[in-house]
Amino acid sequence: MKEFLVQTFSDYRTTIIFLHIISAVLWVGGMITMRYAAHASCSMIQDPKLRMQRAAHALNRLFNIAWPAAVILIITAILMAVGLAFREAAVDASGNVIDAYAMSLYQTIHIKETIWIVMVINLGAMMYRRGQAAKALLIDDLARAKAMLTPIAQYMVPLNIALGIIAIFMGVVLRNAY
């Protein structure tokens, strides 16, 4: 399997890196746009039901972009981590550290991948909450819809924005490291 990943990265390096970067841009940029542009616009709608319907619709559109971007991002991250041989530069076959700097980069890769995985889990939770809000709106349960949507705007999207910015910065650090 490792040979396949290394060969795939070698054959499609530029495409894989491009897909990784564009996925991060779409996902994190979409969340920033949603939180600071669409959310502000939706909050100006006076009718609470219509406001929540518009927010749920906008979130659904965002998630339809973010979910595939997240999957592509994780796949390309694995291809890059293996294809760029960070582990081989850091440890020998027995697992002994052979280069402290390379080991710090290898650890950074794991931290960055962990951040993206936490973001994917949070994305899944947001998608679930949005779906529950949409169901509540269909039966005019505005209190439940609001309870499902509010944490997305107040905590979940801002968390993913912050984590995404950190992960992007770490990617720049890793890119400039070799």
Image (tube, rainbow, N blue to C red):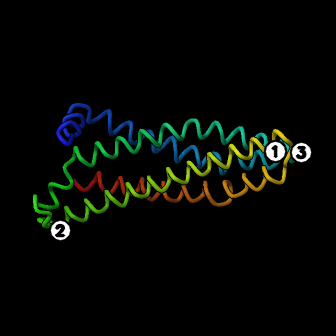
Task: Specify few, some or many for label 2: CA neighbours under 10 Å numbering under 14, 14-19, or 20 or more.
Answer: few
Residue at image position (50%, 53%) is: 119
Residue 163: % across, % down: 49, 58
Q: Residue drawn 21% across and 31% down?
A: 11
Image quadrant containing the N terminus = top left
Pointer 1 or 2: first along the chain: 1
Residue 63, position as x, y percentages in the image:
59, 40
Measured as percent of width and height from the top left, residue 96 is found at 13, 67
Horizontal side of residue 117 vs 2, given as left or right: right
Q: Nearer the viewer, residue 80 or 92?
A: 92
Q: Secondary structure at mark 2?
A: helix
- Kindly check if marks 1 and 2 are in contact, taking CB atoms under 8 A apart as contact: no
Tell me the amino acid under the disc marked 3.
Answer: Asp
Disc 3 element: loop
Most extreme residue toward the right is 47
Residue 93 placement, left or right of 86:
left
Look at mark 2 in the image and give the residue it sits on.
100
Q: Residues within 10 Å of mark 1 (few under 14, many from 20)?
A: some
Three-letter code, disc 2: Ala
Give the vertical position of 10 relative to 161 (above or below): above
Indicate left or right for 59 with 24 as reference.
right
Q: Secondary structure at mark 1?
A: helix
Between the C-alphas of marks 1 and 3, the distance is 6 Å
* Residue annotated with mark 3: 47
Which residue bears the numbered disc 1?
51
